[in-house]
Image (cartoon, coloured by chain):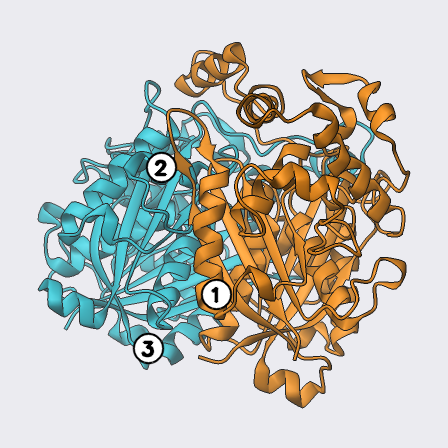
Chain colours: A orange, B cyan
Amino acid sequence: MTKAAVAGVGMLPFGRHRDRTLSDLGVEAVLAALSDAGLAWRDVQLMYCGVVGGGMTPGTGIGAQLGQTGLPIINIDNASASGSSAFREASLAVASGRVDVAAAIGVGKLSQSFGGGSARPGSPEAREGNIRRMQGVMPPAGYFAMRTRRRMHDFGSTIEQFALVSVKNHKHASHNPFAQLQNELTVEEIAHARMIADPLTVPHCCPMGDGAAAAVVVSEERARQLGVRPLITVEASAFRSGIYENGPPSEAETTHLTAQEAYAQAGLGPDDIDLVQVHDAFTVEEIEYCEQLGFCEVGEGERMVENGDTAIGGRIPFSTDGGLLARGHPLGPTGLAQVWETVQQLRGLSGPRQVAGARVGLVHMVGVGGVCIVHILKRP
Amino acid sequence: MTKAAVAGVGMLPFGRHRDRTLSDLGVEAVLAALSDAGLAWRDVQLMYCGVVGGGMTPGTGIGAQLGQTGLPIINIDNASASGSSAFREASLAVASGRVDVAAAIGVGKLSQSFGGGSARPGSPEAREGNIRRMQGVMPPAGYFAMRTRRRMHDFGSTIEQFALVSVKNHKHASHNPFAQLQNELTVEEIAHARMIADPLTVPHCCPMGDGAAAAVVVSEERARQLGVRPLITVEASAFRSGIYENGPPSEAETTHLTAQEAYAQAGLGPDDIDLVQVHDAFTVEEIEYCEQLGFCEVGEGERMVENGDTAIGGRIPFSTDGGLLARGHPLGPTGLAQVWETVQQLRGLSGPRQVAGARVGLVHMVGVGGVCIVHILKRP
């Protein structure tokens, strides 16, 4: 087994891209990643494309535009974790010796073309969907609002504490020209924003948007030939399906188990991590995952945020690019945007949002239905 | 590199399954494959699920019903080749040493819940779709009917010759209790059936339906421990993206290149193959692929069918289970139904449709957008 190394990353600003197709966005992201890696499309031996409800084989169409080299292209729909799954499959294909150069790409265009297809009335799928809607078991209301309320009950947390996650993320995003929302926000503004699902107002929830992001993964040997510096290696790639306990999958518990697996793979622990990207589609998530990834005890997540521990400059910065809440979350590309941010940080190229001396980054993602993925990337 | 071996296969009859969800179908297929392999769900370390437009992470839901073992589940949407892609990824994960036991599953429920999502009016995707629809460049009319007409022009073929593919496939399916259409048909009946896209009447086109199929792939060593007999190994797994030449991808040319790659991997040639499953969603396809897979010269495909060469008992039987035209084509599971049929044939368990002495089977699939996959399976 060789290690997989990230030779290049590319992404587009997340937001609205109404004049361009999903393929247009994908082509640009792949070309940016290839250019960053000093490689050409003909060098890519295998590509995984993460996309949710983008019609049939969108990655295949992107490949065809890039050039008819005949490489295998596999389109993955793993909900929010589609891009992360693509990155993982590409990394493992390299690490297991299947190929030397693999691309992982994620695309999403929720503003115009999103749609997972809907069940025909009268079908058992439609009945299941109706039950779920009647009970409100849909994100954000039935699920993330309930998780927020539960924490308020268990730990006496206040909604203002959760709002601080959004305040911090918007501040990070204000230094990120690729973020969908680059405005700063105050706790008071968040309190008075439009209510989505009590107690969650708009800035407690991630925006819908469009975007694309890509990474080129190569074997360590190939990276050395290419002169990739710093050599950023994939030290861990853990993936667990979710745990269901009398309801939706417990993403906190699954995150804990997946992180344990990733730490074991890398031979590293929470103390070795310099920065973290998490699935913070809703504010409560950073607080829960901060605990479950091992950065504080359960019940202390709120205090981490209040203390500024998870801000750039703090003990363990979370979502340095603004996270899902502000950088945006077009589903397919999100996991690869996290990789993009981590790689730029480890290279020391993050400008005003640089985490000083960052050497090890952890990337976390969950997906509806019970997917959890944790990667650990490291520079020498 | 170890070889991947098929330890077990399972499938449901294809057709209408209106009272059951996509997950219900998937669970049953996986359990059937596990039972066939003598393994339990907890033994499966990795699962790939092929599905087209089945909502978010349907395979993940299937896994959750089977048991919360935490294994990684990756949902693949590669159009018609989704199930074949799942089988390929599972086989390569085993062959490259990532895992010892992987499952590949395909599910589809076109009767009720199919839908790849549609583009919002005014978006560039919607414009692209409109252009395609205006020009009729949609299967079956714009594409397969044109390919049929072109062959009639190039080689003087008659529509009756193409109809013979459907006659043969329906005859094969009449011996297959898992086929969606088990009725026999005559050339005359096909000529008088409802016109879909001139010159293609209904029986020139595959039906829409529901179904699920699965395979359990293990390392050779694990197969020996399990006492799997006969030991059916994956001798080749080739995947090429399509070639576009002034229009839709050329599936014939891509099939040729992919088959060459598969033959090279296996160290085998067309003469070594005992039976073939192809993507025969439309009658013209068997004829084209028969040529491109190397079983006759270009222009001779029609004669192969007329002579009965591609029927059971003939020189090289094609689509012994009825193929897409009669066994059915619910997209996601189709490639795994082909594997199911091939494995049962190589085991000698195919009853009235058994190909005598079958030792090597070739499985071919194409997918909209330019996917082509060829597997070669072999028993000792």
Vertical comparison of B32 with A47: above or below: above
Q: Which percent across, then down, holds residue B116?
A: 58, 34
Which chain does tag 2 point to? B
Quadrant where the C terminus of chain B sits is: bottom left
**Cα distance, mark 3 to mark 1?**
14 Å
Tag in front: 3 or 2: 2
Q: Write down the quadrant of residue B108 in the picture.
A: top left
Of the pair B242 and B280, the residue shown nearer to us: B242
Crowding at dot 3, Cα within 10 Å, few <14 / some 14-19 / many 20+, comes out as some
Please tell me which residue is depicted at 44% across the width and 14% down the height of the picture: A127
Of all residues, the one furthest to the bottom in this rendering is A225
Picture quadrant of residue B189: top left
The disc label shown at residue B266, or none: 3
- Residue at disc 3, secondary structure: helix
Q: Earlier in the sequence, mark 3 or mark 1?
A: 1
Q: Are marks 3 and 2 in contact (CB under 8 Å)?
A: no
- Find disc 2 in the rendering and name its residue: B64
Callout 1: few (<14), some (14-19), or many (20+) C-alpha neighbours within 10 Å? many
Q: Which quadrant: the N terminus of chain B? A: bottom left
Residue A354: x and y in percent read: 82, 62
Amino acid under disc 2: Ala
